[in-house]
Amino acid sequence: MYNVLIVEDQTMPRKLLEIYVNEEKDFNLVASISNASLALDICKRSKIDLILMDVLTELGNNGLDEALLIKKYDSNIKIIIVTSMPEASWLKKAKENKIDSFWYKDGDSNSIIDVMKRTMNGESIFPLDTPTIQFGNASNHDFSERELDILRELITGDSNIEIGKRLGLSANTVKWYIQGLLDKTGFHTRTELAAVARSLGIAIKWVCFHKDATQLGGVF
């Protein structure tokens, strides 16, 4: 039997994951928490075989970065990232952080249980791409990497000059990209563009600090 830790800040998804795990004879639920920063301590105190880890967790703690710390502590602990947000960089970062598998929440118990069993059997399960989300007149798959970078920076509310400095672009180039995003989506203002991108989870930028790391960067 495999010991499982759930890290999920939203009550309903967390309760559903608890039900799924408790109904499976091969898995034993050890703990279910809402803050990713507590996960490593639980791993140090209890025998954990598998973690279902959300990305956005309570108090702004980033599950992807916490997962990296756990992997450094014990690489034998299997970790499945679970999220509903289509932020494209998370798939890439999960692979870079040696996360075992990645699952988009869809309410299907058979899906997550299958990923859990296959992950414990040594497979690495990753979706080919993020889910398709309608974003104004476009979808999240209609944008280049640079356009997504601009979207993430827009969420900060900073000026074109400040955004340009971080991305190595001129303020006029940033303005040009923003206009292109407005044209594609049909939104009328940069504020509307940023707000909808953030609410749909298409673009998320971190600005939090970790107790064991330097600034991770982003606003959420």
Image (spheres, rainbow, N blue to C red):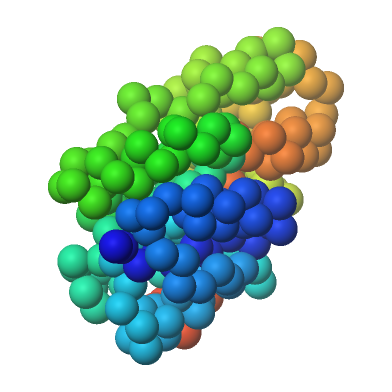
**Residue 70, relative to residue 110: is it above or below?**
below
**Residue 125, relative to residue 142: is it above or below?**
below
Q: Farthest front residue?
A: 25
Instruction: Count the numbered circles shown.
Output: 0
Picture quarter containing residue 52?
bottom left
The location of residue 74, given as percent across then percent down, is 21, 74
The location of residue 9, given as percent across then percent down, is 64, 62
Residue nearest the viewer, comparing 63 with 186: 63
- Location of the C terminus (image quadrant): bottom right
Residue at 19% over, 41% down: 123
Q: Is any part of residue 205 visible from this angle?
A: no
Q: Farthest bottom residue?
A: 45
- Location of the N terminus (image quadrant): bottom left
Picture quarter containing residue 164?
top right
The location of residue 26, given as percent across then percent down, is 33, 55
The location of residue 19, given as percent across then percent down, is 58, 52
Picture quarter containing residue 41?
bottom left
Residue nearest the viewer, comparing 211 with 166: 211
Q: Is any part of residue 198 visible from this angle?
A: yes
Residue at 19% over, 67% down: 75
Residue nearest the viewer, comparing 90 with 168: 90
Residue at 68% over, 21% down: 135
Judge left or right: residue 65 versus residue 11: left
Residue nearest the viewer, comparing 71 with 46: 46
